[in-house]
Image: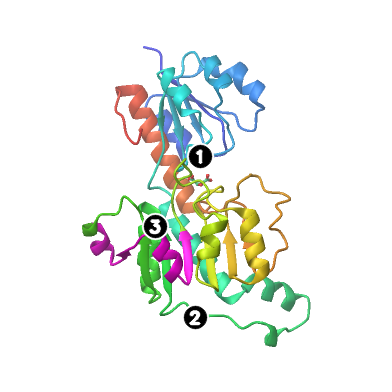
Amino acid sequence: MTKPKVLISDKMDPNAARIFEERGCDVDVITGETPEELKARIGEYDGLAIRSSTKVTPEILEAATNLKVIGRAGIGVDNVDIPKASSHGVVVMNTPFGNSITTAEHAIAMMLTLARQIPEANRRTQAGEWPKKDFMGVEVTGKTLGLIGSGNIGSIVASRAQGLRMKVIAYDPFLTPERAMELGVEKVDLGKLLERADFITLHTPLTDETRNILSRERLEAAKPGVRIVNCARGGLIDEAALKDLLESGHIAGAALDVFAEEPATDNPLFGTKNFICTPHLGASTTEAQVNVALQVAEQMADYLVSGGVTNA
Ligand code: MLT
């Protein structure tokens, strides 16, 4: 019997290739190809393992005549045309748990970094200024954290924030009263969250319902002095409005790991007062990358070799 053939087309922990081989698949690791190169090659493969760089467009899927499964080592599948994949009978899997802790830790790190203005203080200290008088931070203890989304990542953020002695409130239409009680968070509507939160962190996918969830109108309705952290997806916040409200001082700080357009190389927010950012590093730890690589390879090999479906 011929072995299923898998292409790993984005940089991924080497454990993924090892698992595919151990579980009876042939595997090629070919990263950094142009869409045309991928299109020319994809017809050979039964499985395609990706992170975020490979864009699985309708053109790629048209050429993928043998493809049975796409596995995303990570959570977001925004780089895959899901309706087209489904119409071709291609199963799309992700690894919803492998990088949750890492991403939650990044959100907490961004929140504390904002509260104490660490990047600017670091920059000016290393420039020889010793600017002690210019930096007055705020404590997070006793403050209210508003979570927009309390699923895998949001619930971990809640537990870490509670460890920091914050009061956690959450807006999440899927949050049941039982789960809210289990998490020790107060379920609120979005209006109340905006009114009460000293810090807001976002933990939702980008969908038609969540796009621009922090619109200009909602940002204006937020508590004056709020600090906002987004390590989820670009497109959840109106970036132009965020810039205006940071400049006016209504929003005291914003930390973004994700942008409406990525890679973000010249975003208008760059250089704005009290704005800090990272280049979509939410999932970038050694531990998370090993986890998602192992999980995606296990799930895909299982599907290709014995038809088992996980996280599709
Ligand atoms: C994810 O969706 O898993 C994260 O955003 C990580 C990433 O895309 O690198």
Q: Counting residues from the N terminus, which is met first, the one under dot 2 or under dot 1? A: 1
- At label 1, the amino acid type is Pro
At which x and y percent is residue 85? 46, 23
Q: Residue furthest bottom?
A: 133
Residue extent of the magenta highlight = 179-201
At which x and y percent is residue 144? 41, 73
Location of mark 1 (residue)? 14
296 over 259 or under it: above or below: above
Q: Mark 1 falls on what kind of element? A: loop
Q: Residue at x 36, y 52 (%)?
A: 152
Total numbered circles: 3
Residue 68 visible in the shown view: no
Residue 61 visible in the shown view: yes
At which x and y percent is residue 276? 63, 64
Discs 2/1, front: 2
Picture disc at residue 154: 3
The span from disc 2 to disc 1 (Cα, nearest Å) is 41 Å
The span from disc 3 to disc 2 (Cα, nearest Å) is 21 Å
- At label 3, the amino acid type is Gly
Where is residue 37, by image quadrant? top right
Front one among 36 and 180: 180
Looking at the rendering, in which quadrant would you find the N terminus? top left
Q: Are discs 3 and 1 less than 8 Å apart at CB?
A: no
Mark 2, Cα crowd under 10 Å, few <14 / some 14-19 / many 20+, is few
Magenta stretch contains residue 308: no
Q: Residue at x 58, y 58 (%)?
A: 256
Q: Mark 3 falls on what kind of element? A: helix
